[in-house]
Amino acid sequence: MNEDILSGNWNQMRGKLRTWWGKLSDDDFEWISGQKDRLIGLIQEKYGYTRDQAAEDVDRHFGEYENAFEDIKAKAYAFGETAADRARSTFSSVADTVESAGAYLRENKWETMAADLRDIIRKYPLQSILLGAGLVYWISRQRR
């Protein structure tokens, strides 16, 4: 892991570091303050590792951390792409529906539209009542 990345993410990583190296205290983490060399030195001291063993352990754990982060980043990107695709599809569908409704209003007379509305109300009475109540409420709120 790059030294700058380690320093920049130090506070976010402290919890994860505690799970990896439980012998390090809060004071140790304050003293390390994002510096990889200090971390390696403390792991060497607390766990009795050689300098190379401590460095390998740190590099291995940081590599796992970076891989997990990259995996999360890839999943978030894929989720965003899926959401954007669905939004585009929905927008297209809504645009088609609005265009169809506009064509219906242009092509039909009031008598035909009234008959269609009556048929819808007969087919869906409960939904029609709820929609009517919602419209009355909305109109009354607009007048205030």
Image (spheres, rainbow, N blue to C red):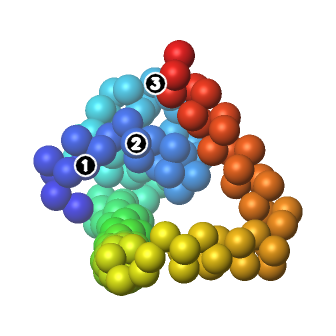
Residue 38 seen in this snapshot:
no
Q: Nearer the viewer, residue 144 or 54?
A: 144
User: Which one is closest to the eye, mark 1 or mark 3?
Assistant: 1
Using the numbered discs, state the Cα–Cα distance from disc 1 to disc 3 in whole angstroms.
Answer: 18 Å
Query: The disc labelled 2 sits on which kind of residue?
Result: Gln
In the image: residue 9, left or right of residue 24: left
Residue position marked by numbered label 1 in the rendering: 6
Look at label 1 and name its amino acid: Leu
Location of mark 3 (residue): 27
Alpha-carbon span between mark 1 and mark 2 = 10 Å
Residue 30 position (above or below residue 43):
above
| Residue 56 image point, x, y percent | 33, 69
Q: Are marks 1 and 2 in contact (CB under 8 Å)?
A: no
Secondary structure category for the residue under label 2: helix
Which residue matches tag 2?
12
Q: Earlier in the sequence, mark 1 or mark 2?
A: 1
